[in-house]
């Protein structure tokens, strides 16, 4: 699996989970402050589209160096 695909899966999961925890109509509602996490993930996706800097990519390359093709 490519790193781009992993990032999309992780970001999409984070967004859906934080929406489920932050929207009052959800059966999993905890607090509206979870919507700040949704905004953070969205802002990070936006800035990484322009700057090509993604903290999740750095993290994944450190955790799975050989699997993702990065030098060990």
Image (cartoon, rainbow, N blue to C red):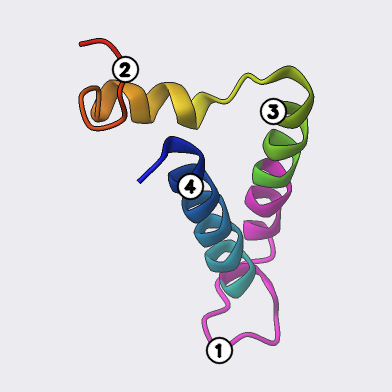
Name the element at disc 1: loop
> Which residue is label 2 attached to?
70
Of the 4 image quadrants, the one containing the C terminus is top left
- Residue 24's x, y, as percent? 70, 80
28 with respect to 19 (left or right): left
> Which residue is label 1 attached to?
27
The residue under the point 61% across, 59% down is 15
The range drawn in magenta is 21-40
Mark 1 or mark 2: whose residue is earlier in sequence = 1
Q: Is residue 15 above or below residue 5?
A: below
Mark 1 or mark 4, whichever is nearer to me: 4
Mark 1 or mark 4: whose residue is earlier in sequence = 4
Q: Nearer the viewer, residue 63 or 67?
A: 67
Report if residue 36 lies within the magenta region.
Answer: yes
> Which residue is label 3 attached to?
48
Report if residue 70 lies within the magenta region.
Answer: no
Q: Is residue 55 above or below residue 35?
A: above
State how far apart marks 1 and 4 are (Cα): 29 Å
């Amino acid at each position: 699996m490519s790193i781009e695909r992993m990032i999309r899966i992780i970001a999409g999961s984070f967004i859906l989970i934080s929406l489920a925890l932050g929207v009052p109509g959800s059966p999993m509602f905890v607090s509206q402050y979870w919507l700040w996490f949704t905004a953070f993930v969205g802002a990070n996706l936006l800035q990484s589209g322009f700057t090509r800097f993604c903290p999740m990519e750095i993290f994944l390359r450190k955790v799975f160096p050989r699997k993702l093709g990065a030098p060990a």
